[in-house]
Amino acid sequence: RDRLKSGQVPVTPPATSPACQHRLWPEIESVVKQQVAWARTGIGECGQGWQLFAEDGEMRMYRREEEVDGMAVDPLKAVHTVPGITGHEVCHYFFGPQYRYDWETTLEQMTVLETVSDDTLVFLQTHKRIWPASQRDVLFWSHMRKLPNENDRDGPDLWTVVNNSTTHLDYPPNVGKCVRIYLKVCLLCQTRVDPPKDGAPLTRDNISCKITYCSVVNPGGWAPASVLRAVYKREYPKFLKRFTAYVVNQTKNKPIMF
Ligand code: 6CM
């Protein structure tokens, strides 16, 4: 048993998020750990079968074709580097419900069902119908977290947002016109700083953000695999380009948020 002598600091730091009191907390802890570890794994280390399906400047998107009961559930992994923004800023705009309609083009309606804490929300979203399939909705918790930079104590922290499907007694799946989709999403962001040589103050020209976005979406009901793959091929690059351009635009005249 660990016994602390007077003046000694406990080895395990206390959990800092108030969300740790919540019933969802054990699941949030384990899914965040698992998703961040997966996002940190380079595409070359992920195993066979990854195909590059979209490329634009620094952005690369890979998918692995997988099916469950004839439905495409292709894992996706994307990497991008965007100048002028920080990881904290990217996560702030991805997480915040007040910005979602600005950048999420497939969204029809978003409701915050529960505010667990400042960094943890439960969302219900309906997405625009894509012919010939039924309209979809999705119910998920979303958790934003700062991950201390273990390699470089003075370097900027990593930031992440993890979204994971959950249930809610008042909103059972597949009762109205919508089929419920199930997702696991992880956005992981690392700020890079290239300080000015002459000791001048840091500006947005000296920073960039390496973004990794991973997702697995189960369409939850009938959706032809070929149509789904064509939708993803069109929508994921559109999402990542539009969302990051939005963050650049929102932050350009604001102080840098590390
Ligand atoms: O991660 C993204 N967005 C987050 C905030 O909204 C969140 C939600 C993801 C929902 C993704 C569902 C999109 C697909 C909807 C169409 C399904 C149609 C099925 C039938 C087709 C034949 O994680 C960005 C998500 C970007 C998705 C392109």
Image (spheres, grey):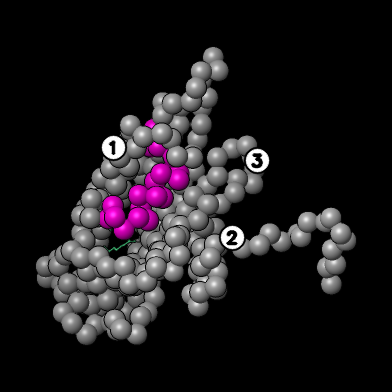
Q: Is mark 3 in CB contact (under 8 Å) with mark 1?
A: no
For this orientation, the residue located farthest to the left is 131
Q: Where is 139 relative to 47, above or below?
A: below
Query: Which segment is the magenta one?
Result: 82-100
Please tell me how crowded label 2 is: few (under 14), some (14-19), or many (20+) other residues with Cα within 10 Å: few
Residue labelled with disc 2: 16
User: On the picture, is 121 further left or further right than 104?
Assistant: right
What label does residue 14 carry, if any? none
Whole-angstrom CA distance, mark 3 to mark 2, is 19 Å
* Mark 2 beta carbon near ligand 1 (under 8 Å): no
Q: Which amino acid does label 3 sit on?
A: Arg
Q: Is mark 1 in CB contact (under 8 Å) with mark 2?
A: no
Q: Please tell me whether mark 3 sits on a helix, a strand or a loop.
A: loop
Residue labelled with disc 3: 153
Please tell me which residue is depicted at 49% across the width and 40% down the height of the picture. 258
The image position of residue 203, as x and y in percent, is: 44, 26
